[in-house]
Amino acid sequence: MLSIRPHADLDHVPFEVDGLSPDRLSSMSLEEIARLPAWLGNRCLTLGECSTLEGDPADEAVHLQGDWSRAAGIASGMTSGSLRVGGSIGPRLGAQMTGGEIVVEGDAGDYLGAEMTGGSLHVHGDAGDQVGGPLPGTKLGMKGGTILIRGNAGDEVGGAMRRGLLAVAGSVGNDLAMDMRAGTVVVGGAIGTDAGLGMKRGTLLLLDPSLTPERFHPMFEEACRYEPSFVEIYRRELAKRAFPLPKPWPTTLIRLVGDQLELRKGEIFIGAT
Amino acid sequence: MKINNTTIVDEFAEAFPMTASRLLVTAADAYWVEVAARESTGYATSVIGCDAEAGIERWLTPEETPDGRCGVSLLFFGFSRDGVQKAVVNRVGQTLMTCPSTACFDGMPAAEKRIEVGGALRYFGDGYQISKLLEGRRYWRVPVMDGEFLCEETLGTSKGVGGGNFLILGRTQRQTLGAARQAVEAIATLPDVICPFPGGVVRSGSKVGSKYKKLRASTNDAYCPTLRATVASALPDDVHAVYEVVIDGLSEEAVVEATRVGVKAACVEGVVAISAGNYGGNLGPVHIALREILAND
């Protein structure tokens, strides 16, 4: 395993290292890794000048120690291996990743897992805005893989999501799953305004027991109350990944359908009291 | 060789390779699970005249099923993967999708070779079907009048062995039928096997061919007690009823173990001998010799 700890003075400026992901580092020596260009603000240094490197990267396992909350684009495009972040990390973690596993013990920034197509991201703390969404200038969000957030997340979570599983144990901000194409979003806590607006297909499973059908945008209409079998499959998958599940987990669910101005094939499930 | 007072005849069962698939079926409660199981495995005794051989492998607790409801594990056997696919798609479509509250899951998720089932039945949803892809497994949610029918897109298949069998030769019909039922109940506790005939028991054992050219199989006259004075009978004088237990399994080992357990369970009061059906070794490559598999018991 390769351990990287940033020097303390990185706290105050943005930090970006192109290609810092386990799969790419695994074929490099420590010296080669130390020579990777690292942008510290508008200065181009090397990773070795900005951080302390220890261990062996050959096993595709990387441990980022210390505070990486200013570091952007870490593990973007990652294809395999495992990355563990001991503290918090900045924006675009795992953006466009296609495989591998990332665990963040602290918080994660905006655009977490943006446009990812595979692999898994597990954040023990909170995450920022646009989780699983499209990167600026593009149309579609995540197209596969799994994002699990044990804490809260910000606005526009799951925006324009095309495929995959995104679960937030806590609350989320406004515009949840805006323009969603497909996939599944699970939220255990409170939600902001305009959830699901513009969604064409896809599933929102919203487990806050205080939610009622009247709480949603007029573009969503109640269809029925029933016990869909597939929800239990998701519950078990989340439980298998030690994801904190709301208790009690509702068995009978209310299905709302929308956005009525789109295909009317998007669905929001809330618990039936 | 004797077990209790029953003679184990020096014969072997002649079995043959098949293709198998396992379905896990769940429903709202045990009543509808049983309805689904019986309907979907009905008329599936022998590929001589049915599209598949099928049966209940075992009942499942809610903890053992993918959707946390009570369920059942079913095995389907056919001569080819295409044949199994056709039979399973038809049966799932006509007997499980129609059955209230059911869902259908893959019982061989690790299998490389697969048949498309939910992927074929999804069109019943007329464009309103929804797929969910989780951990590499795609589930189809087909809207139906009690909610939705959930069915996995593909089911795994594996090689199997069909035609394992043994014959229970008894003094009376009542005693012989009791022994056969005990044998089937003992086999029912084992994994990877089914007994596809009614209640697991066959009374119309067959031989290959017939005096009638159209028939591929006809009654096993040598084991019919009513024909003892008519044909070259294989029955001892004190035998007046014979039942056959046919076993299909996911491996030769599973069929051998089921035969061993079943034969032992059938060696009870009133059972004169246990034999096995074969065709001289010319039909199937899997030969299960009764005395050999019971030698260590």
Image: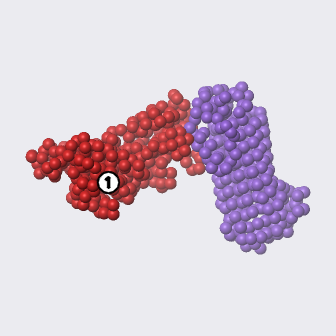
Chain colours: A purple, B red
- Numbered disc 1: secondary structure: helix
Q: Residue at x 54, y 31 (%)?
A: B147
The image position of residue A22, as x and y in percent, is: 70, 63
Q: Residue at x 88, y 62 (%)?
A: A8
Q: Name the quarter where the N terminus of chain B is drawn.
A: bottom left
- Total labels drawn: 1
Q: Residue at x 75, y 42 (%)?
A: A170
User: Does residue A243 appear to the left or right of B289 in the view shown?
Assistant: right
The image position of residue B267, as x and y in percent, is: 28, 52
Residue B241 in sight here: yes
Residue A133 in sight here: no
**Of residues A68 and A232, the one drawn nearer to the viewer in this rendering:** A232
**Of residues B161 and B275, the one drawn nearer to the viewer in this rendering:** B275
Q: Quadrant of residue A72?
A: bottom right
Chain containing the residue with disc 1:
B
The image position of residue A34, as x and y in percent, is: 79, 70
The image position of residue B173, as x and y in percent, is: 22, 41
**Of residues A81 and B295, the one drawn nearer to the viewer in this rendering:** B295
* Residue farthest toward the left in the current orientation of the protein: B229
Q: Name the quarter where the C terminus of chain B is drawn.
A: bottom left
Q: Residue at x 72, y 60 (%)?
A: A83
Badge 1: residue crowd in 10 Å (few <14, some 14–19, many ≥20) = many
The residue labelled by disc 1 is B264
Q: Quadrant of residue A224?
A: top right
Q: Tell me which amino acid carries mark 1.
A: Lys
User: Does residue A265 appear to the left or right of B220 in the view shown?
Assistant: right
Q: Quadrant of residue A265?
A: top right
